[in-house]
Amino acid sequence: MDVDVVVVGAGGAGLAAALAATDGGATAVVLEKEDRPGGNTAASTGSVPGAGSRWQTEAGIDDSAERLATDLLRQSGPHEAEDLVRILATASAPLVEWLVDTHRIDLRLITDYKHVGHSVPRLHAPPSRKGHALIADLLRAAKAADVEVLTHSPVERLIVEDGTVRGVVVSGPRSGTYELRSHAVVLAANGFGADPAMIARFAPQARGLEYLGAQGSTGEAVRWLLDLGATMANSSAFQGYAAVANPHGSITSWTTVEHGGILVDARGARIGDESIGYSGFVSEVSRVPGPVHVLFDTRIRDSVAAHEEEFADLVAAGGVKEAADLPALATAIGVDVNELTRTLETAYAAAAGSAPDPTGRREWGWGPLQPPYAAVRAIPALFHTQGGVQVDAHARVLGAAGPIPGVYATGGVAAGVSGRDGGAGYSSGNGLLAALGLGMLAGRHAAASRA
């Protein structure tokens, strides 16, 4: 064998798998086909759920793996990987504590919001709330653990002998072509968001959405495993984002909505119940005439900018318009002032509790919006797919007769925990919980299973 564990993909899942493998005494190499590591983790907010972490205890937050599992299933509804929900919920607090304590990854409990799908604050994120910071910490930890991370190293295929995965074939213009043999292969190459044909086949609800995830998420790892007899689960599920600032390309923090903001269409009318979450609301935004705007007020703008670096950058770049009153707001976003006035008056009454909301929204954060107002022009987008192959409690890929020897799936390669189809079942942090959590479980098991 050339190495104990080969990891395909240098995002959060792959780096976590390599760290867990080396913790167990194995040698590990990470192969990344793009010119830099990061994957979808780099494009995220770096937020990882940790139910029952010691930081929650210090903050007086009562939480548990059981509560997290209940919350995730409430958001997702019934689906084909419910056992994985409980596995990941149980692993969530140990995952965060392992990253911080063993590898000095800078994650801190977020207490200023709960975010979509969670009944208590349990997301842990870098201080900047940027995935790039999480990747930087993971790369530093990988270097300290003598994990070699090779970019420009696309994997062409798996080496399979007698039904067992024995390594990979790397082939690229800069890497050349060579075999790398191993005791185990961890596939951490994300899903198929950048492959229109696979989107059309597996997740047709996401067709037509602008894709803003990692361009390397082209689905080859999923295809390799299907060829080996693996089974897809929750194949049509995905994580979208209803409010990507246009043309700036960064997300309009959904905290603005949770604090009381609303989304309006090209007429200035409400689109629907925003409290279903940024992923679930994609389908609502996609069906209305644009441009769409997120409306909030300057209290919310300033608070969110003080806590979230990406949103502060959007403000600094001029992506958040300010308006002193309703007529100025209508002019700023290009809608009829009378229509916008009716919209905001109805939302005001619902947020104040003096009348029911026509869309059914019940949670209004800070209450009615107050002038001066703020607005962001936005579009819906696809960030990553949530359908993947079935795995067991160790992230081993399952075939018809049980685990396929020698291969593991993590993150977007594995079945997600966000429902059977569409984006409405996604809870904040589901992507990184599956990526880092399954990466940790896969790396540990691969190290322990060396022959």
Image (cartoon, rainbow, N blue to C red):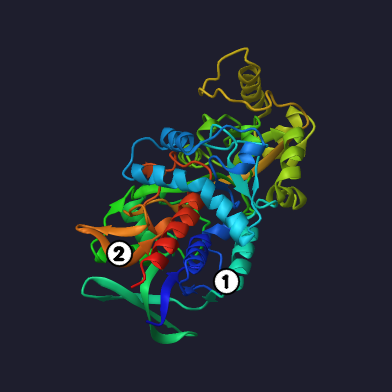
* Residue 451 lies in quadrant: bottom left
Residue type at numbered disc 1: Ala
Residue 420 appearing in the image: no
Residue type at numbered disc 2: Leu
Asked whether 177 or 187 is in front, the reply is 187
Name the residue tied to disc 2. Answer: 225
In the image, what residue occupies the spot 69% across and 33% down?
296
Observer-side mark, 2 or 1, equals 1
Asked whether 333 or 222 is in front, the reply is 222
Res 246 label: none
Asked whether 181 or 273 is in front, the reply is 181
User: Residue 375 in the image: x percent, y percent?
Assistant: 69, 39
Residue 196 appearing in the image: yes
310 vs 427: above or below: below
Name the residue tied to disc 1. Answer: 145
- 59 relative to 35 in the view: left or right: right
- Give the alpha-carbon distance from disc 2 to disc 1, as whole Å: 29 Å
**Element under disc 2:** helix
Asked whether 374 or 103 is in front, the reply is 103
Counting residues from the N terminus, which is met first, the one under dot 2 or under dot 1? 1
